[in-house]
Image: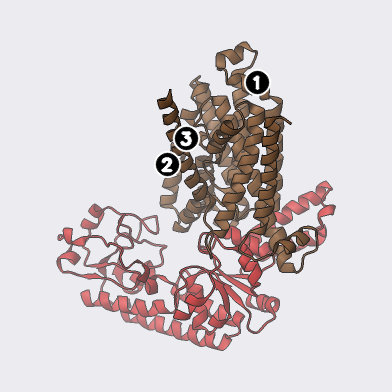
Chain colours: A brown, B red
Amino acid sequence: MSKFSVKIFLLAILCLASTFAALTIGPASISTQELVSCLMGVCQNTVTEMVVWQVRLPRVLVGLVTGIGLACAGTILQNITRNPLADPYLFGIVSGAALGATVANITVANQLTIALPLAAFVGALSSVILVVVIAKALQRMEQLLLTGIAVSFMFHSITQFLLYLGDPFATNRVIFWLMGSLARVEMSNFYVISTILLFALVIIFALHRQIDALLLGDESAASLGVNVDKLRLAMLAICAALTATIVAYCGGIGFVGLMVPHIVRQVIGVTTVPLIIGSALIGGTFLLWVDVIARSALDSAEIPIGIITSAFGSIFFLLIMYRTRNNQEAR
Amino acid sequence: MKLLYVLQIIIIQTTRLKMPQIGKPVLRLKFCLYFLFFNIAIAHAQPSTQAMLTKLNKSKPTIIALSPHIVEMLFDIGAGEQIIGTTEFSDHPEQAKDIPRIGNYIRLQLERIIELQPDLIIAWKSGTPSDDLARLTTLGFNIVYSQPNTFEDIASEIEYFAQLTGHSEKGKDLSSKFIADLNVIKTKYSTKPEITVFYELWSRPLTTIAKGSWPQQHLDICRANNPFKDVNSPYPQVNIEHVLQQPIALIIQPVSFNQKNREGFNWQDWLTIPAVKNNQIIKPDADALHRMTLRSLGELEKLCEEIDLVR
């Protein structure tokens, strides 16, 4: 067994074990034995059945696919832009989703169950489309990230202006929605995210050689027969659809897409296939544990998940900077 | 709203909603329609007293109250003992502090609520997370809403909750007395000359109130003129320059028990404002003034009296 296979096998075991462990932890006290028998279809009472099947299982499964999705999107975006700071959210996805969520909160506050994810999804996709259109008009596809940041600020200012004029409760709802949470998810959300994730993974694996060629530089990739602009656009569209769907259901969960690929590069490898497999396993495991902290750290309340991922993310980033500095000094 | 329920029932009846049957296109459409109408319906629904009493089928149901003002209302009608869970900041009366917490205005702990199995959940329509409420409704919990926008709404909600919780008589008495007392205050101040006031809701940034906000009705009843009443946002941020242009005779600076140390706006720098020059700054109890409960009437009366002294 190669070293790579051993690492992937161990990460897969860790991911599976984390999924089961996350199912056993929650505000309602359910023993492991009760949980196992309930998962087998023999629940001791209706309360346990409701907690396990309607609340905990959907939440854990959505947490898993959300972590996988965000980490894979981050990995692909970092590779196709050759920018270690690329993150799904830098393309204006969250600011677009926030604008959509704000409009939904102000106009149809009584029908948010359907309207909010829909509006957030439309907002996120509109933002990415705008970024791509502007970058194309400028004929500078390599400046996608800078265009993304500019569009983000533009959407952000519109959101803030609407919130300033709107109902104060809408402001609260949008602010806390942006902090991210898995508390509102249902089993149907898991099916939707999983389908898009599967579709994205199939395309990424099919095009992994072309994506790897991009790592050598645009000119080298082109000389190898890769249509750089088309590939970059296709990957961006896939990542945008995946992230927009996740943001629509779970709000803004930052830093997962940014930091997980960096860990995987250190531990597993830099080319697409090992990077994607590693990012999926570490991203999924990471978000499962972050959600466990979110729902069990406080006695009577939940911590929005985005706060925890950002806290971990910022510390991790400082560590990367420190390590880079040490490496440079050593040279 | 009734139409939505009727549509929902028709769709359920015709679909005989069982998942394996949702394969044919027509049934898929019906399922989608059911889903759409169901969600719209649950978001708006306030069941009638009779419908909810039939559902509850209990004289003293157990309750989860999802905001401090609802807890206070329930204690007022004598249903405090029936509350088995509430949200943070439910601090009045003193016994309310002992009720187990199951979340806050950001997020509810669904697992804890399922575990507690309340007969009835009373939620604050605009203040409780709507997605959590939608989940609780689909899980089959009985939910009614509180959304008092006026003093009269407090009276009607007191009566409604009293009927649901098995305290009808007390609810009726409290409600009638509340309305009678409110009318006395309204009559007393209705003919008084207007006085211009500034309501300092928050100091940094300087934030006041306008039409559509809860405290604006206090000012209307006390015949106090709010120069910012017609601003589009209910809680607008204002520049001190805007305030300086107004003949402000009184500054109202409500202070909450939970935020005693909050720094108020330093009005002493602005002696050109008549209220500052004459030291006419009052600090009513924000908790009683801003919480939509029976207590707010007492605070309204005090506020009107203090405004009257400056007139």
Say which element carries label 3: helix
Mark 2 belongs to which amino acid? Ser
Q: Position of residue A155 (x, y in %)?
A: 47, 39
Kindly identify which numbered label has been placed on residue A320.
3
10 Å crowding of disc 2: few (<14), some (14-19), many (20+): some
Sooner in the amino-acid sequence: mark 2 or mark 1: 2
Q: Position of residue A141 (x, y in %)?
A: 52, 22
Q: Is residue A250 above or below residue A207?
A: below
In the rendered view of the protein, which quadrant contains the N terminus of chain A?
top right
CB under 8 Å between discs 2 and 1? no
Q: Which residue is mark 2?
A: A157
Q: Is residue A142 above or below residue A278?
A: above
Mark 3 belongs to which amino acid? Ile
Say which element carries label 2: helix
Q: Which residue is mark 1?
A: A210
Q: Position of residue B253 (x, y in %)?
A: 29, 67
10 Å crowding of disc 1: few (<14), some (14-19), many (20+): many
In the rendered view of the protein, which quadrant contains the C terminus of chain A?
top left
**What is the quadrant of residue B201 in the picture?**
bottom left
Q: Nearer the viewer, mark 2 or mark 1?
A: 1
Q: Chain of mark 3?
A: A
